[in-house]
Image (tube, rainbow, N blue to C red):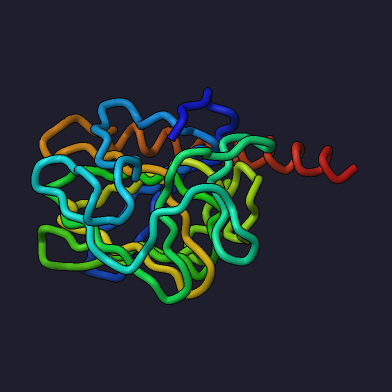
Amino acid sequence: MHLKPLYALAGAAAIAMAAGSANAAVTFIGYQADLNTGETLVTDFDGGATLGDLVLGSDFSLTGTGVLFTGSTAKLSAAPALSPDSWDETQYLSIQKNQSVTLDTPLLSSISFYIGSLDRFNSFTFSLADGTSQVVTGAILAALPGMDANGSQTSFTTNGRLTFSFDSAITAVTMASGNYSLEIGDIGAIFAGAAVPEPATWAMMILGFGGVGTLMRRRRAMAFA
């Protein structure tokens, strides 16, 4: 993936899962092609024709039915947008209708994905070190401040860096799509034991979302004026 300057802050939030389960802290920054501070690149999906050809970091493995794709094909797959009028020109992961891809990982404190045209039928299922699993769908993400899941191929509310962390370390994640398609430009991660934002930092970020939402609404109003 070609790196581009940060274009627009979309938002962040915390998701409370079922009682007794781990909570998820989620951040999303529209058009942020750069990895988050402290992250290691897991894969940018370049360097091979199939998932099995990709060279990953130690203790990572990637399996499933998704395909490596370049460019956009109508009603099939769209390259992740890096701005309103530019798109990822390199190879990316395209998880198409009823496909899934599983990334097995060493213990991770957090993981991020550069996603393209998020839809409500896209999903991420996390396996955690405490033996539980958590499912986060596009429909859930659409309810968070600053995000949409309407499949827009150009909007900064559906194209950007999506980051997850939980109370328990991540050991695997399955990415799936019930229709066409879930597109991922790259994956970054922070290993368990490395520094991640403190709870107070997350709280300050969440408190700022009201202002971000207001700014976004104003931008949208101007766009449709």
Question: Which residue is nearer to you in this view: 98 or 134?
Answer: 98
Q: Quadrant of residue 23?
A: bottom left
Residue at point 60%, 58% (across, down): 73
93 lies left or right of 222: left
52 lies left or right of 200: left
Residue 135 coordinates in the image, percent (x, y): 33, 67
Quadrant (top left, top right, bottom left, bottom right) of the C terminus: top right
Residue at point 41%, 29% (across, down): 34
Identify whether 134 is placed above or below 27. below
Residue 128 coordinates in the image, percent (x, y): 17, 60
Residue at point 59%, 52% (across, down): 72
Identify whether 25 is placed above or below 20. above
145 lies left or right of 122: right
Residue 192 coordinates in the image, percent (x, y): 13, 41
Residue at point 61%, 42% (across, down): 156
Residue 109 coordinates in the image, percent (x, y): 20, 43
Q: Quadrant of residue 15?
A: bottom left
Identify whether 76 is placed above or below 26. below
Residue that protrudes farthest toward the right in the picture:
225
125 lies left or right of 30: left
